[in-house]
Image: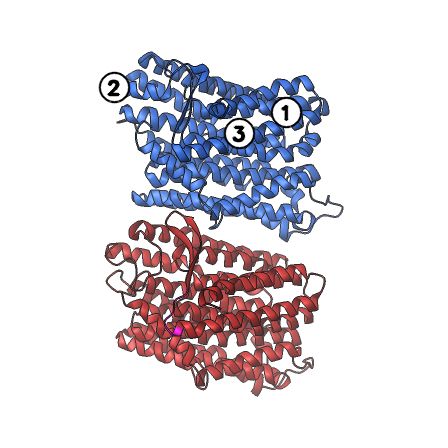
């Protein structure tokens, strides 16, 4: 049984979906998806512990040995991501019960939970698999379920946002599949490690460069790399709160993770990238993302959109570290996947609570929120500090390594950039603080905190924002291990 | 109790006080009694540390490993203890004063006030005991954040504007300059621990060292070097007790403290690591320019705020001279200015409470109606200017002697001009209050509530007492010189 944990990691949430569809009752659907996500989380933690103890775990699907069969591969990097994805999936479930009941029509609730389980399975699958084509399959599973989840949001604009994302996402997936097709053409293999080995020493080869370009753009669309981010703000703003939270914390991160695998474990050892300014391009795009999107965030009329744009900017920090690509910067990048994941979960969960009570999260409706929803306001303040990167919060730890990485190679303008991004983050978090604490609440404004079950999820997420800033064994510790793997060679 | 546990307990006392203030929301008397009790306990804790530290003990402990190789660590050295001591000593009268001020002026949200106030004290103690730059930075930022609700206490448009300037400048400088300087130090030196003799010697080029020094000096915005000083007058929208303890003692002194600590324990107060001339020049300019602004300010609190900017520059100037005498003088001036300035702000708040006056030009004859308040104001003014029998003379003496030792004419000229100017902006207040006749139609009023008067007389007495008995602060200040020896 324990040997099959890598398979169960994906199978448990995957099989929960059809069961939910058969049962149809909202309560049962919630219960099953909650169980599934908690089991998935437990499996992810168990796998991570095993990796920490004994090193990489390789699992041959159906006992077909790699490279012929599909390999599931749990190393420091994928274990790290599994814990993040499964952890957030479990974190939002207690919250989902009341939030989904309020935001999704009752007769569609079971569809929501079924799609949610599929989405979780897809993202976990993308993370755990060691097979290029299998990544594509799971990418499609997670994407298709995501389109449905977004469309289940209230109002017709959710439909439009889902459709927008569907077009862009399909293009992204197609590009990705073209890219791996080219790699298959050159190497005749679809296993990550095997492809890397066969590419090694192959030198400059046009199809490999084309594959690099297609994969970068394809995944760039999915991870909302500036300027391929246009789908994201609408999708986040109009999706149900639970979906926004889960997507913001995991979906884009998993695409980054796949990109990291390609860059450092497939292309880098082959020397195919020599003379191709991938790092420079990434740094330039990230710089634009950090500054432009943070500035756009400052001027958004409502909290959900503001944090959505902030997400694009924060992804810029991650890709910035990938572009710098020294040890410290990569540590910062990978740690930021978790740190930002946790921080944004907290923020979107709390905003979901405001939407539940007040109907929307526009700045006009936030006046005096500090008096009406003291815990929610305080939580957003704390998570906001983590978003800015104040010491003793999660966000600080990753920014520290990013700045150290840039300083190590003497790129002072990048240091200035990271700092500027943080300062603009101060400005947009600031807008919330002023509205909530220094404005008088309008007469007759809705008051009261969200229900206890929702607050439980929120409290855990907010607490994590601080705890991960002080106890860094997981976010920094695992990121450092993963970086050792990335820079150590073909893993 | 061992010195380590005392040092660990000290920052927890005000945290507990903050929690109590929030919990005892509905019982104001109990809440304030708890605050006073916490003040006494904190003072006992810090006071008990003086003996062991003077005997050469350096209590240290690690709370948690924040990042690999970087601990959240504390180490009590003499200068840190001196700063903690002055904060602890002045917290008690401040609490007493706050009680009177908040009640007499009918301020809202008093529980939040006391809670944030206590958290600010905790952060200041954290800054004082920090064992490395990262820990220092953490508490430095915490101090900014927990004092923001105090600055914006009134919640009106003016408070909002002041709060914005306050946060923008403090967070802006710390994030944009202080943090990169810390990271660069970490990259260059491989450690952030405060080490006697510094950690940068031989690790950075002279030019880079100078650049880092300026990053630190301006990044520590709380030290209010011009042109990054504007947050300090902006913070004067806060209620008087906040201006008194935080913007005359805890916050600004945390800034001056950080500069001194960085110069001594990171740069090793060594002129071969960096060029200190630019810092001396900026500090000398700030010293004189802020005094000139103070001279022309009619609003009393604004005048005192600019006086603070100028006095902070004394500390920065003194340490930047790198002469042993002036470095000890810098540490001493932290104490001397704290005791004097808190008295001045207390007096300004008392005048506002009793007579609702905020301008210097309205103070004609006020000393006759409020003899205690203006008596204390006069004593504190003497200390500010550096005249006996108040403690200010001790620190200024050391600083001037250090400047002579360093043979720095610019510094000597600035110190001389600063002294004259401080007499120029403080003595007219005393003159008006005691020697001019009250304006016709002036409403008759007496002293402010008793708790406030007791507090300000106590702090004024302290400035005089420290003139006669300054062995403890002076020994602790001298302890700073250990940091100059590798």
Mark 3 highlights which residue? A232
Q: Which residues are magenta?
A: B54-59
Mark 2 highlights which residue? A202
Position of the C terminus of chain B, as image quadrant, is bottom left
Q: Secondary structure at mark 3?
A: helix
Q: Colour of chain A?
A: blue
Is B89 situated left or right of B100 in this image? left
* Mark 2 → mark 3, Cα distance in angstroms: 38 Å
Mark 1 residue crowding within 10 angstroms, few (<14) / some (14–19) / many (20+): many
The image shows residue B263, relative to residue A173, as above or below, that is below
The image shows residue B262, relative to residue B426, as above or below, that is above
Task: For residue A389, say whether it is visible.
Answer: no
Disc 2 chain ID? A
Q: Secondary structure at mark 2?
A: loop
Nearer the camera: disc 2 or disc 1: 1
Q: Are both tags, 2 and 3, on one chain? A: yes
Mark 1 highlights which residue? A113
Disc 1 chain ID? A
Q: Colour of chain B?
A: red
Nearer the camera: disc 2 or disc 3: 2
Q: Position of residue B120 (x, y in %)?
A: 54, 62
Q: Position of residue A284 (x, y in %)?
A: 37, 34
Q: Which numbered dot is residue A274? A: none
Q: Secondary structure at mark 1?
A: helix
Disc 3 chain ID? A
């Amino acid at each position: 049984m324990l040997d099959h944990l890598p398979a169960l990691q994906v199978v448990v949430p995957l099989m929960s979906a059809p069961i939910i569809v058969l049962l149809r009752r909202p309560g049962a659907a919630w219960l099953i998806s909650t169980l599934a996500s908690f089991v998935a989380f437990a499996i992810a933690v168990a796998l991570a512990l095993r990796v920490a103890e004994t090193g990489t775990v390789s699992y041959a699907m159906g006992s077909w040995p790699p490279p012929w069969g599909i390999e599931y591969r749990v190393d420091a990097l994928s274990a790290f991501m599994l814990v993040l994805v499964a952890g957030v999936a479990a974190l939002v479930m207690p919250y989902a019960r009341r939030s989904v009941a309020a935001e999704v029509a009752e007769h569609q609730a079971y569809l929501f939970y079924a799609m949610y389980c599929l989405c979780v399975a897809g993202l976990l699958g993308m993370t755990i698999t060691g097979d290029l084509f299998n990544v594509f399959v799971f990418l499609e599973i997670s994407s298709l379920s995501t389109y449905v989840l977004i469309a289940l949001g209230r109002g017709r604009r959710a439909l439009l946002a889902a459709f927008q994302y569907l077009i862009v996402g399909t293009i992204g997936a197609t590009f990705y599949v073209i890219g791996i097709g080219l790699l298959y053409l050159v190497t005749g293999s679809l296993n990550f490690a095997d492809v890397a080995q066969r590419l090694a020493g192959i030198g400059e080869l046009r199809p490999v460069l084309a594959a690099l370009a297609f994969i970068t753009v394809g995944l760039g669309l999915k991870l909302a790399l500036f300027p391929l981010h246009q789908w994201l703000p609408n999708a986040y703003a109009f999706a149900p709160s639970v979906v926004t939270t889960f997507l913001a914390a995991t979906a884009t991160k998993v695409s980054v993770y796949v990109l990291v695998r390609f860059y450092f474990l497939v292309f880098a050892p082959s020397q195919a990238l020599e003379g191709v300014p991938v790092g420079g391009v990434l740094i330039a795009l990230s710089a634009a993302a950090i500054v432009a999107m943070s500035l756009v965030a400052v001027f958004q009329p409502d909290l959900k959109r503001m944090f959505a744009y902030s997400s694009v900017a924060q992804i810029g920090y991650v890709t910035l570290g990938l572009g710098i690509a020294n040890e410290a910067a990569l540590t910062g990048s990978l740690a930021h996947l978790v740190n930002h994941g946790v921080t944004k979960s907290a923020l979107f969960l709390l905003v979901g609570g405001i939407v539940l009570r007040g109907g929307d999260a526009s700045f006009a409706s936030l006046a005096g929120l500090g008096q009406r929803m003291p815990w929610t306001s305080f939580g957003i303040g704390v998570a906001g500090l983590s978003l800015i990167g104040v010491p003793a919060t999660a966000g600080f730890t990753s920014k520290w390594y990013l700045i150290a990485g840039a300083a190590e190679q003497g790129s002072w303008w990048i240091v200035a950039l990271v700092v500027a991004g943080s300062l603009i983050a101060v400005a947009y978090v600031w807008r919330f603080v002023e509205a909530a604490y220094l404005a008088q609440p309008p007469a007759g404004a809705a008051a009261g905190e969200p229900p206890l079950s929702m607050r439980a999820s929120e409290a855990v997420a907010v607490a994590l924002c601080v705890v991960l800033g002080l106890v860094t064994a997981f976010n920094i510790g695992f990121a450092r291990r993963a970086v050792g793997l990335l820079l150590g060679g073909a893993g | 109790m061992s010195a380590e546990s005392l040092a660990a307990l000290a920052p927890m006392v005000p945290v507990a006080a903050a929690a109590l203030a929030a919990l005892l929301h509905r019982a104001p008397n109990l809440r304030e009694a708890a605050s006073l009790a916490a003040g006494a306990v904190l003072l006992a804790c810090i006071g008990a540390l003086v003996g062991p530290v003077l005997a050469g003990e350096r209590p240290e402990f690690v709370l948690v490993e924040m990042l690999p190789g970087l601990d959240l660590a504390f180490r009590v050295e003499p200068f840190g203890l001196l700063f903690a001591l002055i904060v602890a000593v002045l917290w008690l009268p401040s609490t007493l004063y706050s009680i009177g001020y908040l009640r007499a002026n009918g301020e809202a949200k008093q529980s939040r006030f006391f809670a944030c106030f206590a958290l600010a004290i905790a952060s200041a103690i954290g800054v004082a005991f920090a064992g490395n730059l990262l820990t220092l930075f953490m508490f430095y930022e915490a101090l900014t954040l927990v004092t923001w609700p105090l600055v914006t206490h009134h919640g009106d448009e003016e408070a909002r504007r002041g709060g914005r300037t306050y946060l923008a400048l403090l967070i802006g400088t710390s994030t944009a300059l202080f943090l990169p300087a810390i990271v660069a130090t970490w990259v260059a030196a491989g450690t952030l621990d405060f080490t006697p003799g510094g950690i940068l010697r031989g690790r950075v080029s002279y030019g880079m060292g100078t650049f880092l020094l300026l990053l630190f000096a301006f990044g520590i915005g709380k030290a209010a070097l011009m042109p990054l000083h504007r947050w300090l007058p902006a913070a004067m929208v806060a209620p008087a007790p906040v201006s008194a303890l935080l913007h005359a003692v805890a916050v600004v002194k945390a800034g001056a403290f950080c500069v001194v600590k960085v110069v001594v324990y990171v740069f090793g107060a060594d002129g071969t690591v960096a060029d200190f001339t630019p810092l001396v020049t900026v500090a000398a300019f700030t010293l004189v320019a802020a005094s000139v602004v103070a001279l022309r300010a009619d609003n009393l609190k604004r005048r005192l705020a600019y006086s603070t900017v100028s006095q902070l520059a004394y500390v920065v100037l003194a340490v930047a001279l790198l002469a042993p005498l002036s470095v000890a003088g810098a540490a001493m001036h932290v104490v001397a200015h704290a005791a004097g300035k808190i008295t001045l702000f207390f007096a300004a708040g008392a005048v506002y409470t009793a007579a609702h006056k905020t301008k210097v030009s309205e103070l004609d004859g006020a000393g006759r109606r409020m003899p205690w308040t203006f008596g204390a104001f006069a004593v504190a003014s003497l200390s500010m200017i550096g005249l006996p029998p108040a403690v200010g003379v001790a620190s200024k003496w050391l600083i001037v002697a250090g400047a002579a030792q360093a043979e720095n004419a610019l510094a000597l000229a600035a110190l001389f001009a600063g002294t004259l100017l401080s007499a120029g902006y403080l003595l007219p207040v005393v003159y008006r209050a005691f020697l001019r006749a009250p304006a016709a139609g002036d409403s008759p009023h007496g002293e402010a509530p008793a708790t406030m008067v007791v507090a300000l007389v106590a702090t004024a007495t302290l400035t005089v007492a420290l003139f006669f008995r300054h062995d403890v602060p002076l020994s602790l200040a001298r302890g700073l010189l250990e940091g100059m020896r590798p």
